[in-house]
Image (cartoon, rainbow, N blue to C red):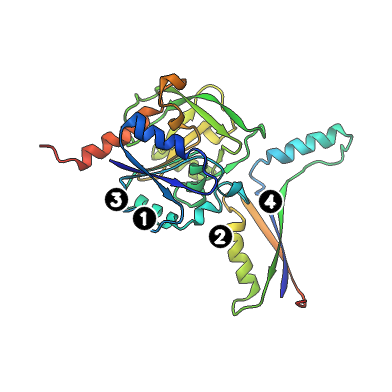
Amino acid sequence: MFKVKVYVTLRESVLDPQGVAVKNSLHSLNFSEIEEVRIGKYMELTVKKSDRPVEVVVKEACEKLLANTVIEDYRYEIEECVAQ
Amino acid sequence: MRFAVIVFPGSNCDVDMFHAIKDELGEEVEYVWHDQDSLEGYDAILLPGGFSYGDYLRCGAIARFSNVMKEIVRAAEAGKPVLGVCNGFQILLEAGLLPGAMRRNESLKFICKPVSLKVENNQTLFSSGYAQNEVITVPIAHGEGNYYCDEETLQTLKMNNQIVFTYEGENPNGSMANIAGITNEKGNVLGMMPHPERAVDSLLGGADGLKLFQSIVRSWRESNVVKA
């Protein structure tokens, strides 16, 4: 069994209007040190072992559905765990 | 001519679309549920607006894997007219039938109001009823209509005259190059954020959208009805 954490964010080249709005709000709260905010999505997957390597499964899931690679980047962390 | 209005769980402009075709345009139309295997017998496919699958994950991301989508891809490849409005446009983008993607509106607000559109290309089967550069009024109603594509794709869109409608005057959502509607390279798949089906009767504020549907019918008649 694997616990997989998937992070999806807008690509660097794509303006993130939510991030800009939150940054401006932080600035008005005197967090002037915070220079940039990028808002993304965080997903937790539980993946069982199969004949396909877990990396292949997760990468394909990201490419096909979890991220839209036209505007989004994704990264993931895979952690093996004991099934309970 | 027979139209299909595809209904996804969460579509909410399907009835408006049906009304526009049946009562205002006067053509045959049927609802087609998203799990259907066949679109045989339909001459044009309409993907209405709404919030398919609650906009979960991304707008259109889940609807794009509906069973009927395989048939929509096939219809598009066969050259049949495929029109996606609002959420329908988002689904066509997610499905890769049109290039690019949608971002949240620049203002982060859901915007619902009539807007001015410029007809950038009246040489498509969807826009032949308009004059080139004609300015029309059609309502928008969306929170994610901020069209994006990379620079290379934008150049291709321009070179092939795939940009059919742009926002005239104010750009309501921040879309790249003021894009409101684009076709695929072949010109038989149109995606647009504004709702032509909500502008088909002057009683409801304007009928500028009706010409779009009339254009589809005219093009179909020209190529399918044998002249006596």
Quadrant where the N terminus of chain B lies? top left
* Residue B149 horizontal/vertical position (percent): 54, 43
Q: Name the residue under label 1.
A: B74
What is the CA distance from the residue labelled 3 to the residue labelled 1?
A: 13 Å
Question: From this viewpoint, is residue A71 visible?
Answer: no
What is the CA distance from the residue labelled 3 to the residue labelled 4?
A: 42 Å
Q: In which quarter of the image is residue A62?
A: bottom right
Q: Mark 4: few, some, or many residues within 10 Å (few <14, many ≥20)?
A: many
N-terminal-most mark, 3 or 1: 3
Do the residues at pointers 3 and 4 share their chain? no
* Residue B142 horizontal/vertical position (percent): 57, 35
Label 2 resides on the chain identified as A
Please indicate whether residue B5 sits to the left or right of residue A78 in the image: left
Tag 3: residue type?
Gly
**Circle on res. A64:** 2
Disc 2 element:
helix
Q: Name the residue under label 3.
A: B41
Q: Mark 4 points at which residue?
A: A9
Label 3 resides on the chain identified as B
Q: Residue at x 66, y 31 (%)?
A: B107
Extreme residue in the right direction = A30
Label 1 resides on the chain identified as B
